[in-house]
């Protein structure tokens, strides 16, 4: 199928789906849509893409009534739906910026920042992150409210260095480690030295260089300790993302933190495709271009959304 034919079917699928959710669709029109999608595998794929995209935009179902029932391109239809639910999407996107209101240090989406602390330690904040610092004569305590931070700790045996993320605490005396807090999940990577990881209602664990531990606030016990690829660990600090045979679903989740839009993969069959490559964080557009070059996908950027779908064959 040519690009033109694929886009034409995608246009038709979106147009029909918008009408079906408008509140004006009849039973006959719903049956007609089922018959339309059953005409061929290409029709069915276009219908599934449209349904996945529609479901990824919260509350856009009510926005359909604002879209005139005339044929338009997918981009215009979706832009109208997105515009109608900007307030809802803004609420979804706000937690990371809001954390910056009360934090001592914060980064915008796509921004990375290096900070030297009063004790000589250094912190690198990744995209969309927020950190507070509370040093006293007895301890050095920090709170990672959101995002990811790499810590290079100055030695001071009399004042332990403690980072809290959610219900997880990471303590080090002199070492280099990374804490990544995403909602209920926290990941700790150790690249130098030793840290002690404590979680409410579980025994403390010691992690050494080359080890990774993942924790979830919804489960009492942490996952098993995993080996850490030191060659690619914290590559974001150098402005790179390095993937070695990583599932496409994981890669997209990582890329999303550097983009203002959300990423939607319309075909779950692609989620386990392995990706190897180097991505340049200083050029967000290049992230998506590199992805298209590495994988059999087409990337479409819409307001608030990046749509990843299988590349047309032929």
Image (spheres, rainbow, N blue to C red):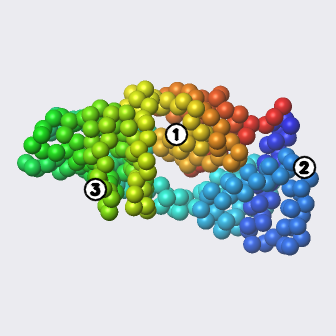
First in residue order: circle 3 vs circle 2:
2
Does residue 263 sit above or below 229 in this rendering? below
Compute the Cα span from label 3 to label 2.
54 Å
Image coordinates of residue 279 in percent, x first then y, are 52, 29
Compute the Cα span from label 3 to label 1.
26 Å
Instruction: State the residue position of label 1.
Output: 255
Mark 3 Cα within 10 Å, few/some/many (few <14, many 20+)?
Answer: few
Image coordinates of residue 201 in percent, x first then y, are 32, 63
Q: Is residue 61 visible?
A: yes
Compute the Cα span from label 2 to label 1.
34 Å
Are discs 3 and 2 less than 8 Å apart at CB? no
Q: Is residue 259 visible?
A: no
Taking depth in this image into account, of 35 and 272 the one nearest to the observer is 272
Taking depth in this image into account, of 3 and 120 the one nearest to the observer is 120
The quadrant in which the N terminus is found is: top right
Q: Is residue 275 left or right of residue 126?
A: right
Instruction: State the residue position of label 3.
Output: 102
Q: Which label sits in the foreground, 3 or 2?
A: 2
Residue drawn where x is 40% and y is 53% of the image: 222
Question: In which quadrant of the rendered view does residue 95 lie?
Answer: bottom left
Image coordinates of residue 244 in percent, x first then y, are 54, 30
Residue drawn where x is 64% and y is 52% of the image: 79
Question: In which quadrant of the rendered view does residue 161 lie?
Answer: top left
Residue 40: assigned label: 2
């Amino acid at each position: 199928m040519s690009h033109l034919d694929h886009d034409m079917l995608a246009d038709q699928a979106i147009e029909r789906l918008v009408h079906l959710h408008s509140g004006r669709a009849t039973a006959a029109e719903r049956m007609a849509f089922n018959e339309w999608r059953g005409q061929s595998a290409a029709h069915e794929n276009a219908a599934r893409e449209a349904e996945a995209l529609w479901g990824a935009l919260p509350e856009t179902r009510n926005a359909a009534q604002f879209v005139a029932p005339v044929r338009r391109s997918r981009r215009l239809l979706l832009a109208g739906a997105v515009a109608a639910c900007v307030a809802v999407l803004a609420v979804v996107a706000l937690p990371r910026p809001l954390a910056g209101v009360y934090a001592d240090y914060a980064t915008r989406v796509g921004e990375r920042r290096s900070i030297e602390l009063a004790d000589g330690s250094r912190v690198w904040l990744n995209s969309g992150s927020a950190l507070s610092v509370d040093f006293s004569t007895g301890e050095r305590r920090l709170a990672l409210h959101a995002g990811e931070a790499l810590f290079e700790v100055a030695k001071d045996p009399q004042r332990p260095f403690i980072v809290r993320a959610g219900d997880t605490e990471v303590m080090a005396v002199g070492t280099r480690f990374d804490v990544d807090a995403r909602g209920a999940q926290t990941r700790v990577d150790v690249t130098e030295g030793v840290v002690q990881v404590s979680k409410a209602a579980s025994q403390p664990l010691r992690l050494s260089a080359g080890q990774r531990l993942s924790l979830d606030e919804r489960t009492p016990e942490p996952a098993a300790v995993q080996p850490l690829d030191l060659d690619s660990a914290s590559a974001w600090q150098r402005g790179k993302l390095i993937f070695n045979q990583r599932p496409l679903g994981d890669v997209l989740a990582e890329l999303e933190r550097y983009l203002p839009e959300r990423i939607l993969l319309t075909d779950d069959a692609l989620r386990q495709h392995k990706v190897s490559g180097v991505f340049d964080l200083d050029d967000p557009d290049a992230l998506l271009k590199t992805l298209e070059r590495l994988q059999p996908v087409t990337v479409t950027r819409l307001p608030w959304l990046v749509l990843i779908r299988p590349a047309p064959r032929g």
